[in-house]
Amino acid sequence: MSLDIKICGLSTPETVAAALAGGASHVGFIFFPRSPRNVTPDQAGQLRQAASGRALAVAVTVDADDALLDEIVAEMAPDMLQLHGKETPQRVAEVKARYGLPVIKALSVADRADLEKLAPYVGIADRFLLDAKPPKGATLPGGNGVAFDWRLLEGLSSEVDYLLSGGLDAGNVGAALSLVSPPGLDLSSGVETAPGIKDPALITQFFAAVDAARATSPA
């Protein structure tokens, strides 16, 4: 089974290159001023050029209005949009219709009841990103380096195409893959030396850890 891997919050040519070299299926660029990973549409447009034909470029926004999305789509030309705020199913449908692009909807998970929130988006969002709920006092909806109980995903409907996110790194990805079989992985802070500072070496180590885990897992 193939495994998609999205490295998110990229902001330099070196880290984009490391993600692509490792075999990333998706590269993510964040448009959220409070995030240390925030980039401008112009910066993302330049960075995503290296991914053309190699990986899908994802624009990550948080409750963005049409004006910001218009600018991002015009300057970055993303392959996908990720909505990481409180966007309703109606808003997801509006964004899909306006831009004609597939949409990843991020949802926060802390307990099994949170997974019930997926239902209204099924058939509207093209994919989901299941992330841990932000810690108390956190100012960011994601990228906080915390994980949720991955066992909650056991028995999740096969209709739900998702990326597992939240606190993943080279040290624990093997455990995650042994507990659940996600269609994809998403990580950001797990390959950073400081908030917003991606390390090409850590990106390389993460891909090596994924390869090692998959090599030893049952077929």
Image (cartoon, rainbow, N blue to C red):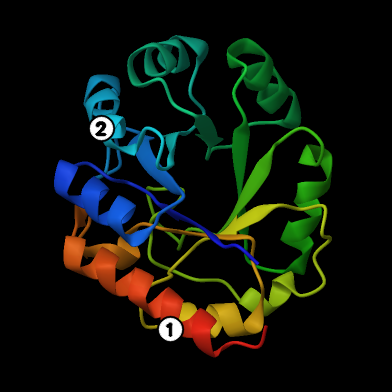
Q: Nearer the viewer, residue 153 or 215?
A: 215
Kindly indicate the quadrant of the structure image that contains residue 3: bottom right
For disc 2, the neighbor class at 10 Å (few under 14, some 14 to 19, many from 20) is some
Q: Residue at x 43, y 76 (%)?
A: 211
Percent coordinates x, y for residue 201 in the rendering: 18, 68
Q: Determine which residue is flagged by label 1.
A: 212
Which label was assigned to residue 40? Answer: none
| Residue 145 in the image: above or below residue 76 | below
Q: Residue at x 38, y 12 (%)?
A: 71
Percent coordinates x, y for residue 157 in the rendering: 84, 61
Give the left or right position of residue 108, taking residue 158 as reference. Answer: left
Percent coordinates x, y for residue 217 in the rendering: 59, 87
Q: Residue at x 41, y 15 (%)?
A: 68
Does the rendering let one see residue 196?
A: no
Kindly indicate the quadrant of the structure image that contains residue 12: top left
What type is the residue that disc 2 sits on?
Answer: Val
For disc 1, the neighbor class at 10 Å (few under 14, some 14 to 19, many from 20) is few
